[in-house]
Every structure is written in structure tokens, then in C-alpha cells.
Amino acid sequence: MDHMVVVVATGKCGAPAASVIEGCADCATRVSFALVLPVIIIVGLKMGVFTPTEAGVVAAVYSIVISMFVYRELPLRELYAAFADAARTSAVVMLLVAAAAVSAWLITVANIPQQLVVLLDPLIGNQTLLLIVIMVLVIIVGTALDLTPTILILIPVLMPVVKAAGIDPVYFGVLFMINCAIGLITPPVGVVLNTVAGVGNVSMDEVTAGVWPFMLVQFIFMFLLVLFPQLVTVPAQFFH
């Protein structure tokens, strides 16, 4: 796309219209191979051809093939270095997931989920206050656990409380997943933060400093949904 902008700008400075059109067509042809990737992933997932995990493998293989044989930006001699880089990044992420699994086991053994139910029981009469407390709780847990352990531990515990308070499960699910997404970019675990830091070869401090404005927007958006449930429930009615 950047190349196309440059070509058009050059055309404004006096280049023949035919050359501008030819340049745009060439750029469109080149980027089309990359733009096919999200189409393959979405169509494959929608049609049940592969699972989300398998979609990652398909995307990786497609990217390697396109980079090597179409764009020719990944020579065969650099393939090993690319695999080694990917392995190091994956190792960092999997170590974090393993640490989160240990934390999840400790939380379960300490019987903390059941204690939370007892603490939340007095708030069942006030839906808004209950949701605010739950969101704060999930934020705190999300700083120490990965996405999957957070869901597996908290959802079975919180759903009975949510249903007893008369809160729409779909509405609660949307809030919970937004909160879990915030947890992915929240230190110290923050799997996404660690992945970005590893791929970009930058420190966690730099990544965290850059992500704060976006995290703040996510917090504001989430609590707006807590205060105004209609923002979720009304659009959801069109899908039932």
C-alpha cells in the first residue's frame, strides 16, 4: 500500500497517467498474495476445514511459501534462523503459560474460588455493583494467569452468581472476554506483551509504556459496557 501511495504521488508531479496505472496495478498484484492469507483463515474457520490452532500452522506455512517463492524476501539460507527465532519466542510464551498453570493450580488448591462466591453473595441484589466487583477481580487474576486458566477457573465459579443476580449470560460473556483480553497486555504475565517484546527485540518496559494508552481505552470501554448493558444486549438481539 505504501508503494501505491508513492506511485500516485509521483503521478501528481507529472508522470504519465499510464505509468501510474501500471505501477498501481503492479503493486495491487504483489499485495494480493498477502491479502489472500486472512481470507484463507476466515473461510477455513467458518467452513470447519481447520481449528484455530491449525489455522496458525496454515498461516505460517503459507507465509513461508509466499516469502520464499513469490516475494523472494526469505532466502533458503535464512530459513533456519527464522525457525530458531520463532522457537525462542514460542519458548518464552510457553514458559509463561506453564507458570500460569502452576498459579492456577495453587489458586484451586487454596479453595479461593469458593471463597470468592461467599464474598460476592451479598452483592447479588445490585447487578451493576456486582459486575464492577467481578470485573476488578478478573483484572487482578488476569495479571497473574493466562487466558485459558482464567476462563477455566473463574467461569464455573462466577456463572452461578451471575445467573442468580439475573444478569444475561451473553452480556457477561462479552464483558469477561474483554477483560481477559486486557489481561493479555497487563504485566507481569501479559503473554502478548512478552511475545511483542521477544519479536521486536525491545524491553518489557518499552512495550508496557507504549501499551498504556490503549489499555486505558479498553478499561473505559469495558466499564461503559458495565454501566450501559444495552450497548451489548441490544445488538445481540439481532443475532438470536
Image (cartoon, rainbow, N blue to C red):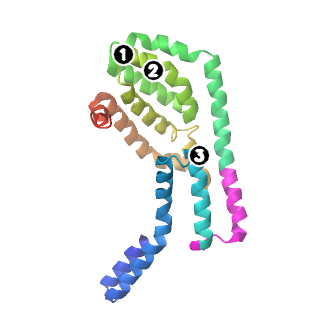
User: Split into 4 quadrants, where in the image is the C terminus?
Assistant: top left
The stretch drawn in magenta includes residue 87: yes
Q: In which quarter of the image is the N terminus?
A: bottom left
Q: Distance between the residues labelled 2 and 1?
A: 10 Å
Name the secondary structure under disc 2. Answer: helix
Q: Position of residue 3 (x, y in %)?
A: 43, 75
Amino acid found under the numbered disc labelled 2: Met
Q: Residue at x 65, y 17 (%)?
A: 109
Q: What residue type is labelled 1?
A: Ala
Q: Name the residue that disc number 3 marks.
A: 53
Q: Depth check: 129 or 232 in front? A: 232
Q: Give the range drawn in magenta.
A: 70-89
The residue identified by callout 1 is 165
Where is residue 211 shown, x and y percent of the image? 47, 47
Q: Please tell me whether residue 218 is drawn above or below residue 201 in the rendered image.
A: above
Q: What element carries label 1?
A: loop
Nearer to us: label 3 or label 2:
3
Q: Is the magenta stretch mostly helix, strand or loop?
A: helix
Q: How far apart are marks 3 and 2 (CA)?
A: 27 Å
From the image, tell me which residue sits under label 2: 159
Q: Can residue 145 be seen in this view?
A: no
